[in-house]
Amino acid sequence: MPLKIAIVGRPNVGKSTLFNRLAGKQLALVDDQPGVTRDRKEAPGRLADLPLILIDTAGFEDVTDDSLEARMRQQTEIAIREAELALFLIDARDGVTPMDERFADLLRRADLPIVLAANKAEGRQGDIGIAEAWGLGFGEPVGLSGAHGEGMGELYGAIRTAL
Ligand code: GDP
Ligand code: MG
């Protein structure tokens, strides 16, 4: 049975990029504009020997920033209800932002294992953000680069441990 994983977090942290990497296909739209992907997308994928069903969450681009966050929260709530594990992404270069904190509050109330990853952490550019991410209280953050495929072994280990 594949493991159903919801990739969640605020707009522009790299959810769709990671989704595409794990799905191995360009199924989710990736764009430089925050929140350009619409609605939720599902695709089968794989991480090493672990078969996955991936859920990508997104907002709607044609709304104001405030309602974008509301949309994202709604999509996240639906996705985590369907998923067996939530992969919570932050942007390691930005560190923990107030919007990340609000997503963390939502996830803390949910009854499923959470793996926290600080994405865009290629090289050492994410080190401060990874350290900051400990403060969200989801245990050891995984340093990740979805775009460059770094940290996939650590991600695998963290998912295995969380299950
Ligand atoms: P989403 O809104 O969370 O789905 O984020 P996207 O996947 O659409 O990515 C938003 C932006 O971040 C795009 O410009 C991506 O190319 C970029 N991005 C995604 N992952 C990485 C990464 O691992 N490293 C870097 N440097 N940029 C990334
Ligand atoms: Mg997206």
Image (cartoon, rainbow, N blue to C red):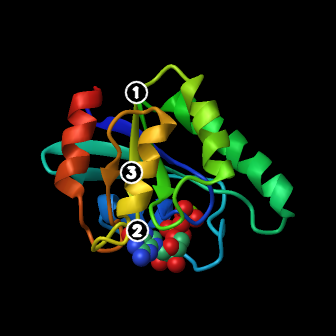
Q: Nearer the viewer, mark 2 or mark 1?
A: 2
Q: Amino acid at mark 2?
A: Lys
What is the C-alpha distance between the residues marked 3 and 1? 21 Å
State yes or no: Cβ of the residue under disc 2 lies below 8 Å from any atom of ligand 1: yes
Q: Earlier in the sequence, mark 2 or mark 3?
A: 2
Q: Residue furthest bottom?
A: 32
Q: Nearer the viewer, mark 2 or mark 3?
A: 3
Q: Is residue 67 above or below residue 102?
A: below
Secondary element at image label 1: loop
The crowding category of the residue bearing disc 2, from other C-alpha atoms within 10 Å (few below 14, some 14 to 19, many at least 20), is many
Q: Amino acid at mark 3?
A: Ala
In contact (CB < 8 Å): disc 2 and disc 1: no
Instruction: Choose between 25 and 122: the one closer to the eye.
Output: 122
Residue 86 % position (x, y): 45, 37
Residue ID for mark 1: 113
The residue shown at (45%, 24%) is: 112
Instruction: Choose between 86 and 100: the one closer to the eye.
Output: 100
Q: Is residue 75 above or below residue 3?
A: below
The residue shown at (75%, 68%) is: 61
Residue 13 % position (x, y): 52, 62
State yes or no: Cβ of the residue under disc 3 lies below 8 Å from any atom of ligand 1: no
Q: Is residue 4 left or right of residue 9?
A: left
Q: State the image quarter where residue 125 is shown.
A: bottom left
Check residue 42 in the rendering and tell me which mark sits there, or answer none: none
Residue ID for mark 2: 120
In contact (CB < 8 Å): disc 2 and disc 3: no
Q: Is residue 41 visible?
A: yes
